[in-house]
Image: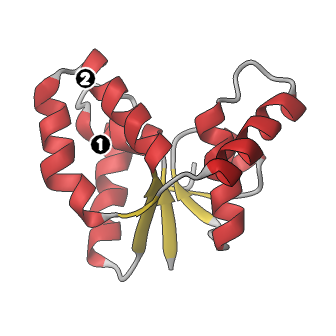
Amino acid sequence: MTIFVDTSAFYALLDGDDYHHAAATGEWEQLLTSNAVLVTNAFVLGEAMALLQHRIGLDAVQAFLEDIYPLFRIEWVDGTDFEAGAAGVLSAQRRDLSLVDCVSFFLMRRLGIRHAFAFDQHFNEQGFHCLPPS
């Protein structure tokens, strides 16, 4: 199975004080022992690194780059992905739905990925199955 991983999961894994930390750690351990292919995209990487750096610090960024990043297949965002994401933001007419989310949804649909390791309920709203189940 292929699993898309969102910023919300990366953050919950690395911030021991995050509300979802225990659930994220348990799910992460299960994913690592399964045959799951872990996928994310370049926009999520940028968002996750900026969030980790700002809220936790450079030690969290270093842990992310050394321990987590190498385990992923990265989908690099091209112009078509960006344009589809931007169109999604505008058509949704919601301030709480980000470009990063909309690009992620577009890529997941294009790649046929139905499962997301995410604590962002926008993935559920878009019809994806979130792990861990809430």
- Mark 2: secondary structure: helix
- The colouring scheme, among rainbow, by chain, secondary structure or one colour, is secondary structure
Q: Marks 1 and 2, Cα distance to the nearest angstrom? A: 14 Å
Find residue 104 and report its horizontal and vertical position in percent. 61, 49
* Foreground pick, 107 / 37: 107
Q: Which residue is mark 1?
A: 13
Q: Is residue 119 above or below residue 133?
A: above
> For this view, does 83 lie left or right of residue 99?
right
Determine whether 94 is above or below 11 in the image.
Answer: above
Give the class, few, some or many, for how many residues have Cα within 10 Å of label 1's Cα (few <14, many ≥20).
Answer: many
> In the image, 72: left or right of 79?
left
Q: Number of callouts in the render?
A: 2
Task: Find disc 2 in the rendering and name its residue.
Answer: 53
Give the percent coordinates (x, y) of residue 18.
34, 28
Say which residue appears at 23% left-offset and 31% top-offset.
Answer: 16
The reply to whether residue 40 is in sight is yes
Q: Position of residue 31 (x, y in %)?
A: 35, 68
Instruction: Say which amino acid is labelled 1.
Output: Leu
- The answer to whether residue 20 is seen in the rendering is no
The answer to whether 36 is drawn above or below residue 126 in the figure is below
